[in-house]
Image (tube, rainbow, N blue to C red):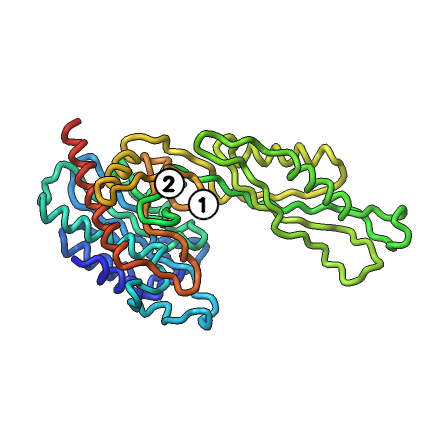
Amino acid sequence: MDPLELSQALIRCPSVTPTDAGALDVLQGALTGIGFTCHRLPFASDGGAAVENLYARIGEDAPNLCFAGHTDVVPVGDPAQWSVDPFGAEIRDGRLYGRGASDMKTAIAAFTAATARFLGAHGPAFGGSISLLITGDEEGDAVNGTLKVLDWLKHEGQVIDACLVGEPTNTETLGDTIKIGRRGSMNAALTVHGSSGHAAYPQLADNPIHRLITMLTAIIDTPLDDGTEHFSASQPVVTSIDVGNPVTNVIPATATAKLNIRFNDLHSGASLDALLRQRVDAIGGDYDLTVRISGEAFLTAPGPLSATIAAAIKAVTGGTAEFSTSGGTSDARFIKDHCPVAEFGMINDTAHKADENAAVSDIGTLSEIYQAVLELFFTNHTKA
């Protein structure tokens, strides 16, 4: 099985969230061909269209090493910004172009091809199980994908013992970064209420903008923490201030700011919510604060799984990977409640951009690293 050809076949499916566009059919065909039992798992909510997911497994014994990923991709954006067909999977100057080339259809293809070679060398009785959990809902709301597949696995009595997520983790060269955790993410909307009035008579009004600025200063100026061994300091970022005032001589009655906070494991969503309210309450006045947590911070402390991935990288490339918790959220935030999880995939510099691409040589090298992970994981289990 050629990981490049499979990458191209997957990229040629325009699977923009939540549309599958045949991507899981392509993958299921490849996996069935090497002996996997595949389960298609469509999930929907609120009467919406179902999202297609796939769980595939070969073997019945423990440990079950799972590869998790997603075939859905973000929208193309402005097609004029692309120099190639975003779903053409064109190879140019040694690079494969197309939406999903970095994030993360190539990683799925690389792992599938690595598994085919591993099974070809060891046969089906290799001392464990290999599975793939592939969703079509990672780039969207992530409510009908990995989370529900994990619930299905629990109901079916299926256990995942360790999980490698194929997100693009590397920054400059293939093999430079393994993600062992992720920061949490909070989105907050702070609306301050005052009373409107003439700008020439500010003493007769209650200007919510001034109080909002003071509240934002209280949130931003005092650090939330100093970071930890594996995490940078939590960082509040103001993303919008909205008043909706079309004139210059009227003080508005309300003012709203939006913030995003990427936080480390010194906080939970609930504790950070309480901290924000404490700082805002110290300013006083009428306000509304709404928060939404898209993911809690988590850490899988360096251990057997991350050490196995690092050793595989070393064996194939000769390089030493850094353990990191940087970047946005991923579906690893759901999987960490079930088993140790680490992330390793392609270089992420063109992910979500126009002309997204990956070096053809990196696809082959990633597949070799994944095969080395399989060899080391099951060898170490046998020795244990």
Q: Nearer the viewer, residue 94 or 229?
A: 94
| Occupied quadrant, residue 87 | bottom left
Q: Is 255 positioned to the left or the right of 270 in the image?
A: right
Q: Is the Cβ of the residue at disc 1 closer than 8 Å to that at disc 2?
A: yes
* Rendering coords of residue 34 (x, y %): 14, 53
Query: What residue appears at the point 31 percent right and 45 percent down from the top-left corner?
Result: 175
Question: Where 230 sits versus 80, above or below?
Answer: above
Q: Which residue is mark 1?
A: 327
Q: Nearer the viewer, residue 85 or 196?
A: 85
Mark 2 residue element? strand
* Rendering coords of residue 35 (x, y %): 13, 51
Q: Is 232 positioned to the left or the right of 149 in the image?
A: right
Q: Label 1 is placed on what type of residue? A: Gly
Query: What residue appears at the point 35 percent right and 56 percent down from the top-left corner?
Result: 102
Callout 2 crowding tier (Cα within 10 Å): few <14, some 14–19, many ≥20: many
Q: Which residue is mark 2?
A: 179
* Rendering coords of residue 354 (x, y %): 43, 64
- The C terminus - image quarter: top left
Q: Is residue 151 visible?
A: no
- The N terminus - image quarter: bottom left
